[in-house]
Image (cartoon, rainbow, N blue to C red):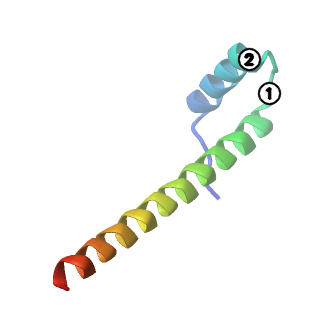
Amino acid sequence: MMKLPPEAITELQAIYKAEFNIELTSDAAQAEARRLLLFFYEFLLFVQQKQTNSNLSTSASSQS
């Protein structure tokens, strides 16, 4: 499992405090970072799939 460097955890804790006025423990910040990275991973897969499908349909249209 990925571990964030201590500086990244501290930075995320500061951002979370500034944005939501909630203080996160190091473990909670690590968990939030993991969820955020998973979200972006899934989002990028979705976008990539949409682009691939769009390219395939454009390619099929131009071949007809």
Image quadrant assignment for residue 55: bottom left
* Above or below for 55 versus 18: below
| Disc assigned to residue 13 | none
Residue underneath mark 1? 24
**In this orientation, which residue lies closer to the viewer: 43 or 13?**
43
**Foreground: 49 or 15?**
49
Name the residue carrying label 2: 17
Q: Is residue 24 above or below residue 14?
A: below
Q: Quadrant of the N terminus?
A: bottom right
Q: Is residue 56 left or right of residue 24?
A: left
Percent position of residue 24, x then y = 79, 27
* Residue that extends furthest to the bottom in the rendered view of this protein: 64
User: What residue sits 75% from the left and 33% below the top?
Assistant: 26
Quadrant housing the C terminus: bottom left
- State the CA–CA distance, disc 1 to disc 2: 8 Å
Q: Amino acid at mark 2?
A: Lys
Which tag, 1 or 2, sits closer to the chain's start?
2
Query: Residue extending furthest front?
Result: 64
- Tell me whether the residue at label 1 lies in contact with that at label 2, contact meaning CB atoms closer than 8 angstroms: yes
The amino acid pointed to by label 1 is Leu
Examine the image and state in which quarter residue 18 appears.
top right
42, above or below 11, in the image: below
**Residue at position x 55%, y 50% from top?**
40
Q: Give coordinates of residue 6: x percent, y percent.
A: 61, 32
Residue 13, x across and y down, in percent: 70, 24
Give SS at disc 1.
loop
Q: Is residue 58 left or right of residue 12?
A: left
